[in-house]
Amino acid sequence: MEHSDNIFLVGMMGAGKTTVGRQLARRLHKRFVDCDHEIEARTGVSIPTIFEIEGEAGFRRREAATIEALAQESGLVLATGGGAVLDPASRAHLKSGGWVVYLDVPPDVLWARTRGDRNRPLLQVADPRARVRELHGLRDPLYREVADYIAESGQGSPLSIVRKLEREYLNRCAA
């Protein structure tokens, strides 16, 4: 069942999915959901704690279940986690559940935005800048595969991106 009134934002950590999603939802009178916050609300623990106890695989299972449930709803803007596209079932739920937007940001900009953020378990490594590049290289083809629209969002204000997405959504999806 297609819920074309949903908007799913995908992209790397630091791409601005939450910032853009919150503003876009407000402008379009939709409910905003941040997937990571939803997982924390459902489990009662933080994402770093889930990673610590269950590892990335456990977190990804929880993320996939959350995306599956949210894709069944309508009238929402969902900011997914950066790795949500790694699961084939999640990609299918995103594709069938709404309009998917890839916020495409260059790795160096992502690094500048995320450096020093202790709430990003995948960046707690010896060379986090190289890790951002590696993750971007692995995930970029998956974001492109699932995306209905690609927004180059490394430059410009979040509001300018929101306005562009609002116009695209109204032109493509609300017609």
Image (cartoon, rainbow, N blue to C red):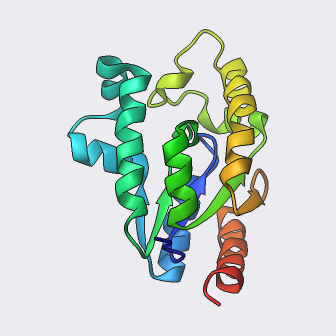
Foreground residue among 67 and 46: 67
Identified at 49% across, 55% down, the residue is 93
Identified at 58% across, 59% down, the residue is 95
Q: Where is residue 154 in the image (x, y as percent from the top left)?
A: 77, 50
Left or right side of 50 for 101:
right
Residue at the far top: name it.
126
Identified at 78% across, 41% down, the residue is 106
Residue at the far front: name it.
1
Q: Where is residue 6 in the image (x, y as percent from the top left)?
A: 50, 71
Does residue 81 appear in the picture of this structure?
Answer: no
Residue at the far left: name it.
44
Foreground residue among 146 and 110: 146
On-image quarter of the C terminus: bottom right
Q: Is residue 80 above or below residue 27?
A: above
Q: Where is residue 131 in the image (x, y as percent from the top left)?
A: 66, 21
Foreground residue among 124 and 151: 151
- Which quadrant holds residue 54? top left
- Which quadrant holds residue 47? top left
User: How many numbered marks appear?
Assistant: 0
Residue at the far bottom: name it.
175
Identified at 25% across, 48% down, the residue is 41
Q: Where is residue 123 in the image (x, y as percent from the top left)?
A: 56, 23
Does residue 90 appear in the picture of this structure?
Answer: yes
